[in-house]
Image (cartoon, rainbow, N blue to C red):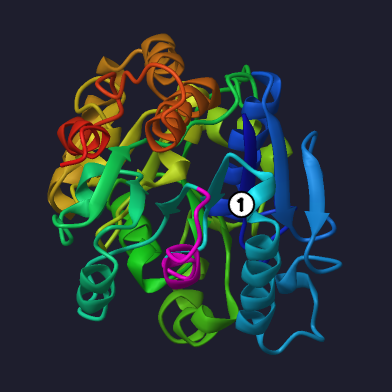
C-alpha cells in the first residue's frame, strides 16, 4: 500500500528529545515500512526515517528561532500534500482538524489520528461541521466529548518492543517524566513523594508557554529535600531512568488523551501510579501494571502496595498491549476499511469503535 504519513513540523521525526506525537509517528512509519509498505513521510528536513522523506522545512520548528508563524508552514504542507494526493492509496494525518476542509474536497482516502484533548467548547462546532471525516482516537476517553464523530477505531499507542527494556538497577526513587505544565501537576508528585520522604527525580522539559507557571509555582518546590530536577531526557536515557524508579507518578490534572510515559515505564517493568483522569484507567491495569487513584491520599497509600506488583509481569503486559507492531497492524485495518482493500478485522483489541467502522463499510 502507498501510504503518506503527514506529521507536525514542530519536532523532527523522531524528535531529538521530548515530543509525544512525533515519536508515535516515527514508530508507526518504521513499522509500516518493515511490514513492506511504500511509505512517504512529510515532515521536517532533519527527520530520520527508512521511509521516503519529503522535507517540508529544513529543521524542526521548535529548534528554528527564525520561524514566528508555524501555522503558515503547516498550511503550506497541506497544500503540497494535496497536490500529490493521487500518488497515494491513503493519507494519514497527525495534524488535528487542519486537514478536514481541504481533504474532504478530494478523492484519495484519508484519516486523521487525533492526539490531543477534545473536550473544549470550540471543538463542538468543528466536529459537527466535519462529522463525516474519518478519525482515530488514541483512547476511548478522548472521544467521549464527540460521540457523533466518524470514529474508525480507538488505537492505543505502541512503541518498539526493544526500544526500552528493564535495566539492572536498585529501585530507589520515584520518577516524574514529561513536561512541567499545570495539567501534568508535578506539584502533586512532589507532595506525594514528600509525604513519604521518598526521593523524587523529575525528568521534564519546560515549554516557553509554561515558563511563568514554572517560575511562580514550581521552582521553589525543587529545593525541597529529596527533589531533583534533572531536565529533559531522550530515549537513550529513559531505560536507566525508569528502571531505577520504584514507580512513575502520573498525577495528571486534565483529561489525559493517552499518556505515553506510562507505557514507557511499563516497558521497563516499572509500575505506574496515576490519577483516574482521561485515558488512565484504560492504560493502567489497576493492581497489575500500577495503581489508578483518585487523590493524593490514595496515591500515598498506593506506595505501600508497590511490592505486590511483579516487574516481569508489567513488562509482559507491555509486550501484549503496547508494541509498535500491534499499533501498525491496527492502523492497517483502518486503512483497509477506508480503501476497501482486503479483509477487515476491526474487532481486535485494543482497537474499539468497531460498530461504527462496520456501518461505514456497509454504507450506513
Seen in the picture, residue 320 relative to 19 is either above or below; the reply is above
Q: Give the side of residue 236 with respect to residue 176, left or right.
A: right
Q: Which residue is mark 1?
A: 22
The quarter in which the N terminus is drawn is top right
Q: Quadrant of the C terminus?
A: top left
Return the x and y of residue 264 as percentages of the image width and height: 50, 34
Which is more toward the observer, 270 or 137? Answer: 137
Measuring 24% from the left and 26% from the top, which residue is drawn there? 285
Residue in front for this viewpoint, 28 or 202: 28
Q: Please, what secondary structure does the residue beneath circle 1 have?
A: helix
Q: Is residue 62 visible?
A: yes
* Coordinates of residue 58 in the picture (x, y in percent): 86, 67
Q: Measured along the vertical axis of the image, is residue 331 above or below residue 61?
A: above
Magenta highlight: main SS = loop
Which residue: 64% across, 31% down? Answer: 240
Q: In x, y percent, where is residue 308? A: 25, 16
Look at 35% across and 12% down and name the residue there.
310
Q: Is residue 316 magenta?
A: no
Q: Quadrant of residue 239?
A: top right
What residue appears at the point 71 percent right and 72 percent down from the top-left corner? 62
* Residue range of the region highlighted in magenta in the rendering: 97-108
Residue 105 sits inside the magenta stretch:
yes
Residue 246 showing in the rendered view: no
Judge by depth and name the residue closer to the eye, 172 or 315. Answer: 315
Q: Residues within 10 Å of mark 1 (few under 14, many from 20)?
A: many
In the image, 86: left or right of 55? left
Q: Percent from the top left, x then y, of residue 287?
A: 20, 23
How many numbered discs, if any? 1
Amino acid at each position: 500500500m502507498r501510504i503518506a504519513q503527514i506529521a507536525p513540523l514542530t519536532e523532527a521525526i523522531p524528535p531529538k528529545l521530548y515530543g509525544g506525537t512525533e515519536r508515535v509517528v516515527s514508530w508507526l512509519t518504521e513499522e509500516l515500512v518493515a511490514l513492506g509498505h511504500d511509505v512517504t513521510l512529510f515532515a521536517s528536513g532533519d527527520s530520520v526515517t527508512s521511509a521516503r522523506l519529503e522535507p517540508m522545512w529544513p529543521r524542526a520548528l521548535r529548534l528554528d528561532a527564525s520561524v514566528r508563524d508555524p501555522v503558515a508552514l503547516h498550511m503550506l504542507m497541506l497544500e503540497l500534500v494535496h497536490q500529490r494526493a493521487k500518488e497515494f492509496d491513503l493519507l494519514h494525518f497527525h495534524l488535528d482538524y487542519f486537514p478536514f476542509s481541504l481533504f474532504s474536497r478530494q478523492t484519495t482516502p484519508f484519516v486523521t489520528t487525533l492526539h490531543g484533548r477534545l473536550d473544549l467548547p470550540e471543538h463542538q462546532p468543528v466536529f459537527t461541521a466535519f462529522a463525516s471525516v474519518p478519525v482515530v482516537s488514541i483512547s476511548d476517553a478522548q472521544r467521549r466529548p464527540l460521540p457523533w464523530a466518524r470514529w474508525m477505531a480507538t488505537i492505543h499507542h505502541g512503541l518498539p518492543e526493544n526500544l526500552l527494556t528493564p535495566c539492572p538497577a536498585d529501585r530507589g526513587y520515584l520518577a516524574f517524566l514529561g513536561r512541567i505544565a499545570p495539567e501534568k501537576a508535578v506539584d502533586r508528585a512532589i507532595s506525594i513523594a514528600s509525604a513519604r520522604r521518598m526521593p523524587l527525580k523529575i525528568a521534564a522539559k519546560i515549554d516557553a508557554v509554561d515558563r511563568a507557571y514554572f517560575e511562580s509555582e514550581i521552582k521553589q518546590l525543587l529545593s525541597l529535600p529529596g527533589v531533583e530536577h534533572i531536565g529533559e531526557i531522550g530515549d537513550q536515557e529513559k531505560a536507566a531512568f525508569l528502571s531505577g524508579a520504584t514507580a512513575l507518578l502520573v498525577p495528571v490534572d486534565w483529561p489525559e488523551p493517552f499518556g505515553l510515559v506510562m507505557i514507557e515505564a511499563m516497558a521497563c517493568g516499572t509500575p505506574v501510579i496515576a490519577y483516574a483522569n482521561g485515558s488512565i484507567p484504560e492504560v493502567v491495569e489497576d493492581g497489575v501494571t500500577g495503581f489508578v487513584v483518585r487523590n493524593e491520599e490514595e496515591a500515598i497509600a498506593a506506595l505501600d502496595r508497590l511490592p505486590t506488583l511483579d516487574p516481569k509481569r508489567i513488562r509482559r503486559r507491555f509486550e501484549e498491549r503496547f508494541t509498535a507492531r500491534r499499533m501498525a497492524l491496527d492502523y492497517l485495518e483502518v486503512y483497509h476499511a477506508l480503501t476497501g482493500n482486503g479483509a477487515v478485522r476491526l474487532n481486535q483489541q485494543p482497537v474499539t469503535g468497531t460498530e461504527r467502522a462496520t456501518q461505514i463499510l456497509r454504507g450506513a
